[in-house]
């Protein structure tokens, strides 16, 4: 499970933070999970003007990259954060 907390920031760019609890694991595990999340979110087209905090749960530690990407994409589709290709053309 992944929780996304979003808030408009009135800036020309979006800022993304990661809050990974100690319950997820030790420092190495938490940092590895944050690196994986950063890499996946970096590939997505996020609209500017939002602050985003991603809060992953313990189950994400052993999840594959494809599954992580699917879950993150699913969460982002429920928000106005993803820019669509049609909007970029206008």
Image: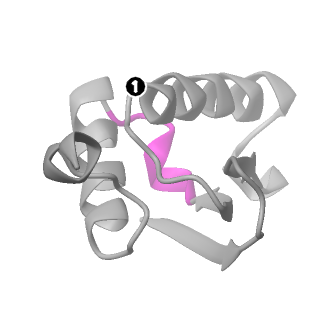
Colour scheme in use:
one colour
Q: Residue furthest left?
A: 86
**Is the residue marked by circle 1 packed among few (<14), some (14-19), or many (20+) residues within 10 Å?**
few
- What span is in magenta? 57-63
Q: Give coordinates of residue 81: x percent, y percent.
A: 43, 63
Residue 68 horizontal/vertical position (percent): 34, 40
Left or right of 49 on screen, residue 26: right
Image quadrant in which you'd find residue 9: bottom right
Q: Nearer the viewer, residue 24 or 31?
A: 31
57 lies left or right of 80: right
Image quadrant where one finds the N terminus? bottom left
Q: On the image, which quarter does residue 75 sit in?
A: bottom left
Q: Nearer the viewer, residue 33 or 43?
A: 43
Establish if 17 lies above or below 74.
above
x 26%, y 65%: residue: 77
Along the line of sight, the residue nearer the viewer: 27 or 89 = 89
User: Is residue 48 part of the magenta span, yes or no?
Assistant: no
User: Which image quarter: residue 21?
Assistant: bottom right
Residue 71: percent from the left, percent from the top?
29, 53
Task: From the viewer's perspective, tell me whether residue 89 is left or right of residue 5.
Answer: left
- Label 1 sits on residue: 43
Is 67 on the left-hand or right-hand side of 58?
A: left
Residue extending farthest to the front is 90
Q: Residue at x 38, y 39 (%)?
A: 45
Residue 74 picture location, percent across and down: 24, 61
**Residue at the spot x=73%, y=41% of the render?**
25
């Amino acid at each position: 499970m992944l929780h996304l907390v979003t808030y408009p920031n009135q800036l020309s760019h979006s800022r993304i933070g990661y809050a990974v609890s100690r319950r997820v694991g030790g420092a190495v595990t938490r940092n590895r999970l944050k690196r994986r999340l950063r890499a996946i979110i970096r590939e997505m087209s996020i609209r500017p003007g939002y602050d985003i905090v991603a809060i992953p749960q313990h189950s994400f530690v052993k999840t594959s990259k494809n599954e992580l990407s699917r879950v993150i994409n699913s969460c982002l589709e429920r928000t106005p954060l993803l820019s669509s290709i049609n909007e970029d053309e206008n």
